[in-house]
Amino acid sequence: MSGAGEMKAQAPRDEIEARAAEFLQRRRFWGWSAEDDAALESWLSQSVLNRVAYLRLEAGLDRIERLAALAPAESKQARAPLLPMMLRIAAVLGVVALAGAAAANYFLRPHDRVFSTPLGGHETVSFADGSEIELNTATSLRARMTTEERIVWLDRGEAFFHIKHDPLHPFVVMVGDHRVTDLGTEFLVRRSPRKLEVTVVQGQVSLDTPDGLSRSHAVLLTPGDVATASAGKVSVATATTRDLANELSWRHGVLVFDNATLGDAAAEFNRYNREKLIVSDPAAASMTIVGTFRTSDMILFAHAARDALGLSIAAKGDDIVISSRH
Amino acid sequence: MSETPHAWRDRHGTGAAVKADAVSAWFVREILPLEAILMDYLHRNWQNPSEIADLRQDVYARVFEAARAEVPDHPKRFLLTTARNLLIDRVRREHVVPIEAVADLESLGLALDSPGPDRVLMARDELRRLQAALDRLPPRCREAVILGHVEGLSGNEIALRMGVTKFTVSEHLAKGVRLLTDMLYGEEPRKP
């Protein structure tokens, strides 16, 4: 056997990497057609050197994008000219001297710290005051924990807050325009594109939400309350102890489904894994299941759905498609 | 060795395709985070720095091929053993340096079976790394990368904003992902 470096007439590494990078940037920033996809597949299957170069740069691109996503959402929506943009990045990075005194209010101050988890990640952060925050999958938050104030901005994702209560220094979680103030100890906050969910496990929490008339009103939440805020409306439901335990099961790396629909269960798995579960028809999506799965056990889940519900499963690229048998 | 296994041609089939994709996923998850360690090993044990990137690529190809047959239990040990074997092969073939120059893995003092570097660095440190990496890009390349990856502009929008052709934007973006990947994966994070 010969070394990989002398396999047949291989293109030089530089050429391979250039080609892989060209595919990647085209797929990310320009139109991508079925023909492009076929050309990529054909190129990848020509040589394992092509494949490892592509996988490596693809992972690099994912990492760049994940880091870039940590810049506060405001800075990205602004579509500002380049220079202020770079200053904002500098500020996010804590390079405060660069940002100057004219910083906007979302600029990080020296004490601010940024924490994030990738897809499928789970991290616990401890603070000097004894408080702990557990970050679930694909979550990003900024924390300003000083002797004067305790504020966390949940920029995306979900976090469980275990807070040392201090009546003189209330702990505040900002989620967009909404403000969650800790009046007790344990609560869960989940931010998704269109809504905010606050679940209280222990103690009390106050949820301030803008009502669209530039005034805000507060809702007091007690243990078992699940508040859902969307489009200026807040609704509060009460969860049973069992519901609460299921809601928090990610803290133990598992998902608990108690008569969840297949559609909802797939959506839960997809919060944790890069490969996606796709339920292709409404009939399958409305079937219900009971069971406990590790967040990474997507394939096991698909097999369980096939065996228990008589559905069929198929691979589509990296994804798994679940559908009714016809 | 150049024979393409069926699973790779039939990527969209069932069963075998999951296995093939699983190797890719394993490679990205377990091997790539070790790149800084691999690069350090290669730099210590190979005299010609201009060949290091080629060696890295060859090591990856060997590891990937081996994982298709059976996914190794200890990724770090397997990666570095593969690197050592590749260097020994090259030394034998080229008679450039005595074989003794290829250090034993153990002599490097690496805790081979310990977990790799923390996969979840504190985001602030990671952001500092990205900033430092961006600073080292050529200016126009950096501008395209920031507009695309940070501001989320499309290729056409970047071309308009920068007043250059789409082709030039493509070149900047392709170069950017290569240089940033080398820095983010291939270099040890500097201690603050």
Image: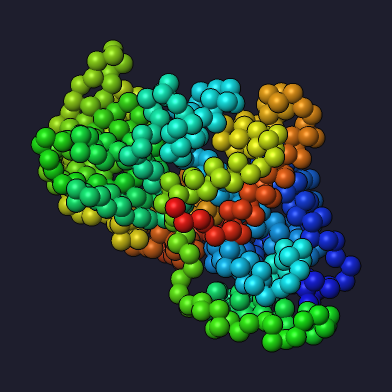
Res. B42 in view? yes
Res. A154 in view? no
Horizontal side of residue A163 vs B169, given as left or right = left
**Residue A241 placed where, x, y %?**
17, 52
Task: Write the residue at 19% across / 43% down.
Answer: A200
Q: Give the quadrant of the N terminus of chain B.
A: bottom right
Horizontal side of residue B13 vs B114, given as left or right = right
Q: Nearer the viewer, residue B185 or A207?
A: B185
Task: Write the residue at 49% across / 45% down.
Answer: B128
Horizontal side of residue A248 vs B96, given as left or right = left
Coloured how?
Answer: rainbow
**Residue A88 placed where, x, y %?**
49, 30
Q: Nearer the viewer, residue A100 or B152?
A: A100
Q: Which of A194 and A262 is in front in this view?
A: A194
Task: Write the residue at 32% across / 39% down.
Answer: A111
Query: In this rendering, is residue A135 above or below B97?
Result: above
Q: Quadrant of residue A31?
A: top right
Task: Write the residue at 34% across / 60% down.
Answer: A254
**Residue A201 placed where, x, y %?**
17, 47
Query: In this rendering, is residue A22 above or below A79?
Result: below
**Residue B124 placed where, x, y %?**
43, 46
Query: In this rendering, is residue B28 above or below A88?
Result: below
